[in-house]
């Protein structure tokens, strides 16, 4: 597809460019609107729609592509993970995507303590490669599990361990690079570089030596501008000089980086202070202890975390205080590392309000996640308020950091802005997200005024505008406030030596665009009406506001082999199947410039087609992007008053069809099940229902649990627990469609256990449904009617405060979360949040009684947590109940099972569905002993396991009933 809103001559030129690139390289060439939209933003405030995106397979591809771009006289932009915060990873250029193919680690030399890698290699992969040799790559930004080495070199990235191991520039040994004019040069390594470019750089350094020594500050966190100090005679290092140039000078083909000794064990001392100012005042005392890290957090970060994630518990581990320092220590053994951390805590006792020392790796990991997810957490307040980067990572000498923080807060106050901060306190580097108004002219004027005053404050303290993330478009305009004219001229000459044609990421660092150009959220956007079907309560009722939620930090695009978010990306590795890619497309759809079809956009439809609506992003994305809700909204708008896909009528309305089947005699249901197994009839039925031919139609129960209960059929039996029947009062069991019609035995066991615990279990007076199948297929009106009818049915119980227990996690989660999106004005929706619980949450109130009867030694269980439960409900009660029942539980970090309600049944989704299951779930089952139960409360999860032919899974209610019977 051709670029939009450009002259016809440019369209023709871009088509010719695309054709020549396709002929020249073996990697992908993407000039379609969807790809250009997805690559139009990084993790900054800025937007730059690329001419096209290419994914070279090797250095030869890069060289060939560069020659084509040179022939067509178009700029280029090398990119990695695109998590840059200053806007240097977006531009109107041909984007060279190195993460897709050029991500290998070529070699590790433990004797030389180096690793040679391609530019797309992920930071954590390099660290893991060094681990067997007791080595690691020192720099580790918070995005270490997805950012690329090439990007880190481009930005001169640092991370939490910089007090021990420095910035990226301190860890680069040599670089192989390619200029826009096609010169292939190796910098560093054995010999002294020769040639026109190295000679010109040395001459520049010799000429400017006095100015450089006079005006380039000696600061551990100086990242702003080019590294002219690496050109001074006597300390020339051309590889290090190229670090931090943000793709404006040359393209990296490979890099040899230093590895450092990594302590075998680590511990963490968390120090509490009255406030963040006092924490900053004391960093020099902590530095004297020679720790690995000194990270700081303000009370505002913790308050935001607790408000946004009410069930979060990790922050409760922090000592008393209003500001904290994380101080990591290392040692040969865990005891030695912990002893070092305790020494730090003891040394700091006169200055702190308290301390906590942790050496358990899981606890340390949980505490680090609080710090590492700060950037995302602080972009949204619980009421939907927005905060932005821009003034993101300035650094001052650490001995002046406390004074700087106090004065920085006064600058915020003077401009009427609020910011919550954290950062690398040990290096005097501050991270902050500020509630800028980037939507109005007065707001942008205020943004400019604040940025100017903040820059002057940093310079006054002898600091750097950027201490980690680079200048990009956010701060490059301010460089003349930090450096005198002769240094700015030196930057221009440095750029000219490398890139005389001005085609390498133009408009960044040298002769930059202004800080208020190209803002993603700017006047006049979006163009679509903002009248969503869902409430979007967390985004002040605005779908457009929801599309701005994604900040581009890229946590959804981590290749871990496990975890919930994002299952489709983990299978396809395509940006359009990541949460970030989908969010970018929806944002551009609302804008209407690149994605022009609105709700009828095929690019967006194609991207969302493989979204499993697992809700993993809602909990795992740092900013809470809820792609399941966005998909629902898109489908609702796209098919408004239109013919829908067949699956929407069959599986989207499944509860309606099952109610009809449930009214049939048992013999008739048996006959239907037999007919569903006849190949020809099954094929016809699946074709009519939009179901993949490789899926089996699940058998329907001969009789529902509600029908059996209505006839007074005996329940499953468990021992008498010595509790008077009904003594704990009434309890309403939510009889969801899936349990009732497919697995009624689960309901029978649940009722038996609850009755034994002293509850008088009641059923709704008539059929109830949460409306989830209609919601997930975008039939919002139908979902709203179904849920409203169900709330009327259980209304008296809710009004009376009767507990409501759900057995199916997706339905329980829908009642607790989706209900507010469907019926925001219904007063009983608020009661759902208070009175609806999972079966495990209810049993968790009685673990002592369960433990007394069940005892220990009740076997093992592999536990598959349903995605919606992970996102909305949590699994701690499940773990506690299983422990009380004497079950040795292993909770799988397997992510989505892949079936995901109707998704895995829909025609065209089978391969992705099964690939999701094969990431971790199915291999874990095969590797386990047959005596180990497969516990899956979700009907989708149980169905996926059954249809994979592995084992018959069970529900927690069945585990509980069996344990008590034993």
Image (spheres, rainbow, N blue to C red):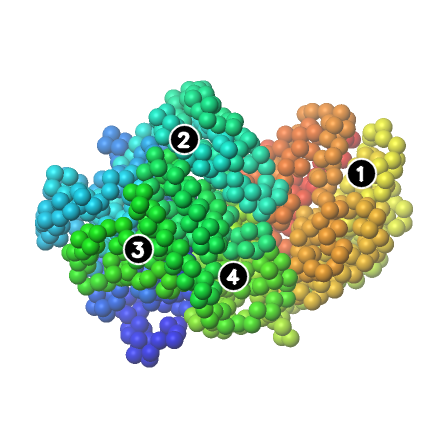
Q: Which residue is mark 2?
A: 282
| Of callouts 1 and 2, the N-terminal one | 2
Decide if residue 135 is in sight here: no
Q: Earlier in the sequence, mark 4 or mark 3?
A: 3
Give the left or right position of residue 493, taking residue 269 as reference. Answer: left
Mark 1–mark 2 distance (CA, rounded to whole Å): 55 Å
Distance from disc 3 to disc 2, alpha carbons, whole Å, reads: 30 Å
Instruction: Residue at 67% x, 30% y: name it.
Output: 883
Which residue is at a point 57% across and 39% down the rendered structure image?
892
Q: What x and y, as percent, mark residue 158?
A: 34, 41
Residue at disc 3, secondary structure: helix
Mark 3 touching mark 2, by CB under 8 A? no
Q: Are marks 2 and 4 in contact (CB under 8 Å)?
A: no
Please, what secondary structure does the residue beneath circle 1 have?
helix
Question: If you read the primary sequence from the N terminus, does the residue marked by circle 4 or circle 1 appear first?
Answer: 4
What element does badge 2 sit on?
loop
Quote the CA–CA distance across marks 4 and 3. Answer: 30 Å
Q: Residue at x 20, y 46 (%)?
A: 215
Residue under label 3, please give it.
478
Q: Badge 2 local density, few (<14 within 10 Å), some, or many (20+)?
A: many
Give the label, 1 or 2, closer to the camera: 2
Q: Nearer the viewer, residue 340 or 911?
A: 340
User: Which x, y percent locates residue 170?
Assistant: 26, 38
What is the CA distance from the residue labelled 2 to the residue labelled 4?
A: 41 Å
- Residue annotated with mark 4: 547
685 sits to left or right of 608: right
Query: Which comes before the other along the chain, label 2 or label 4?
Result: 2
Label 4–label 3 contact, CB within 8 A: no
């Amino acid at each position: 597809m051709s670029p939009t809103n450009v002259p016809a001559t440019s369209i023709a030129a871009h088509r010719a460019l695309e054709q020549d690139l396709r002929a020249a390289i073996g990697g992908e060439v993407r000039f379609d609107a969807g790809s250009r939209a997805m690559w139009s933003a990084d993790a900054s405030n800025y937007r730059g729609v690329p001419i096209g995106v290419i994914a070279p397979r090797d250095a030869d591809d890069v060289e060939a592509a560069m020659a084509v771009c040179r022939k067509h006289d178009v700029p280029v932009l090398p990119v990695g993970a695109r998590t840059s915060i200053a806007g240097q990873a977006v531009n109107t250029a041909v984007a060279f995507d190195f993460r897709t193919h050029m991500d290998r680690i070529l070699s590790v030399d433990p004797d030389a303590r180096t690793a040679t890698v391609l530019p797309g290699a992920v930071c954590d992969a390099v660290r893991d490669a060094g681990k067997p040799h007791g080595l690691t790559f020192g720099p580790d930004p918070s995005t270490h599990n997805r950012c690329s080495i090439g990007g880190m070199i481009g930005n001169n990235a640092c991370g939490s361990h910089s007090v021990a191991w420095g910035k990226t520039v301190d860890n680069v040994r040599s670089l192989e690079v390619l200029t826009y004019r096609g010169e292939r040069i190796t910098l560093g390594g054995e010999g002294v570089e020769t040639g026109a470019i190295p000679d010109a750089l040395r001459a520049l350094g010799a000429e400017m030596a006095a100015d450089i020594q006079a005006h380039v500050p000696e600061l551990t966190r100086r990242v702003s501008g080019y590294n002219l100090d690496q050109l001074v005679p006597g300390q020339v290092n051309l590889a290090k000089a190229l670090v931090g140039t943000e793709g404006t000078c040359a393209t990296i083909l490979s890099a040899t980086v230093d590895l450092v000794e990594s302590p075998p064990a680590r511990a963490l001392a968390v120090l509490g202070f009255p406030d963040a100012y006092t924490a900053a005042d004391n960093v020099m005392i902590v530095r004297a202890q020679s720790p690995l890290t000194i990270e700081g957090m303000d009370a505002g970060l913790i308050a935001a975390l607790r408000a946004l994630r009410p069930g979060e518990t990790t922050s409760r581990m922090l000592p008393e205080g209003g500001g904290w320092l994380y101080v990591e220590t290392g040692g040969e053994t865990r005891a030695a590392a912990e002893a070092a951390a305790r020494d730090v805590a003891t040394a700091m006792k006169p200055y702190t309000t308290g301390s906590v020392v942790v050496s358990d790796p899981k606890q340390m990991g949980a505490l680090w996640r609080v710090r590492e997810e700060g950037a995302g957490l602080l972009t949204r307040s619980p009421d939907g308020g927005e905060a932005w980067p821009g003034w993101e990572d300035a650094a001052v000498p650490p001995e002046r950091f406390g004074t700087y923080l106090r004065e920085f807060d006064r600058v915020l106050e003077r401009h009427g802005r609020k910011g919550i901060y954290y950062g690398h306190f040990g290096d005097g580097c501050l991270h902050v997200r500020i509630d800028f108004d980037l939507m109005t002219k007065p707001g942008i004027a205020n943004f400019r005024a604040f940025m100017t005053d903040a820059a002057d404050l940093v310079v006054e303290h002898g600091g750097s505008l950027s201490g980690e993330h680079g200048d990009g478009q956010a701060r490059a305009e301010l460089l003349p406030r930090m450096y005198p004219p002769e240094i700015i001229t030196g930057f221009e000459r440095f750029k000219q030596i490398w890139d005389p044609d001005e085609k390498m990421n133009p408009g960044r660092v040298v002769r930059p665009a202004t800080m208020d150009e190209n803002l993603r959220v700017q006047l006049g956007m979006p163009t679509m009406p903002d009248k969503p079907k869902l409430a979007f309560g967390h985004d002040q009722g605005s779908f457009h506001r929801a599309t701005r939620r994604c900040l581009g930090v890229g946590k959804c695009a981590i290749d871990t082999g496990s975890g919930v978010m994002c299952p489709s990306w983990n299978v396809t590795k395509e940006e359009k199947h990541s949460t970030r890619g989908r969010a970018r497309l929806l944002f551009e759809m609302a804008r209407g410039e690149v994605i022009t079809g609105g709700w009828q956009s095929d690019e967006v439809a194609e991207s969302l087609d493989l979204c499993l609506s697992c809700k993993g992003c809602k909990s795992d994305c740092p900013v809470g992007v809820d792609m399941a809700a966005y998909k629902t909204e898109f489908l609702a708008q796209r098919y408004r008053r239109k013919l829908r896909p067949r699956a929407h009528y069959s599986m989207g309305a499944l509860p309606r069809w099952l109610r009809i089947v449930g009214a049939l005699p048992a013999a008739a249901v048996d006959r239907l099940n037999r007919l569903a197994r006849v190949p020809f009839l099954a094929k016809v039925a699946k074709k009519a229902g939009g179901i993949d031919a490789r899926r089996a139609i699940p058998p329907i129960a001969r009789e529902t649990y509600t029908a059996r209960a209505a006839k007074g059929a005996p329940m499953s039996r468990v021992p008498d627990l010595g509790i008077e029947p009904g003594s704990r009062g009434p309890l309403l069991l939510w009889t969801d469609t899936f349990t009732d019609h497919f697995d009624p035995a689960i309901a029978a066991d649940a009722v038996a256990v609850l009755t034994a615990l002293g509850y008088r279990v009641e059923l709704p007076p008539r059929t109830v449904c949460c409306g989830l199948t209609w919601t997930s297929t975008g039939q919002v009106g139908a979902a709203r009617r179904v849920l409203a009818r169900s709330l009327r049915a259980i209304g008296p119980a809710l009004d009376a405060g009767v507990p409501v227990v759900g057995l199916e996690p997706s339905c329980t989660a829908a009642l607790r979360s989706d209900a507010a999106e469907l019926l925001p004005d219904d007063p009983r929706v608020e009661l759902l949040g208070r009175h609806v619980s999972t079966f495990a949450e209810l049993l968790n109130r009685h673990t002592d009684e369960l433990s007394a009867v069940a005892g220990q030694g009740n076997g093992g269980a592999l536990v598959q947590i349903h995605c919606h439960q992970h996102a909305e409900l949590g699994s701690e009660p499940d773990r506690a109940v299983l422990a009380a029942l004497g079950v040795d539980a292993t909770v799988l970090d397997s992510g989505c099972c892949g079936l995901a309600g109707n998704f895995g049944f829909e025609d065209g989704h089978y391969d992705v569905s099964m690939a999701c299951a094969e990431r971790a779930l199915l291999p874990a089952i095969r590797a386990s002993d047959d005596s180990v139960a497969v516990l899956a409360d979700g009907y989708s999860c149980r169905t996926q396991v059954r249809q994979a032919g592995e084992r018959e899974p069970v529900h927690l209610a069945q585990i509980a009933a069996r344990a008590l019977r034993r």
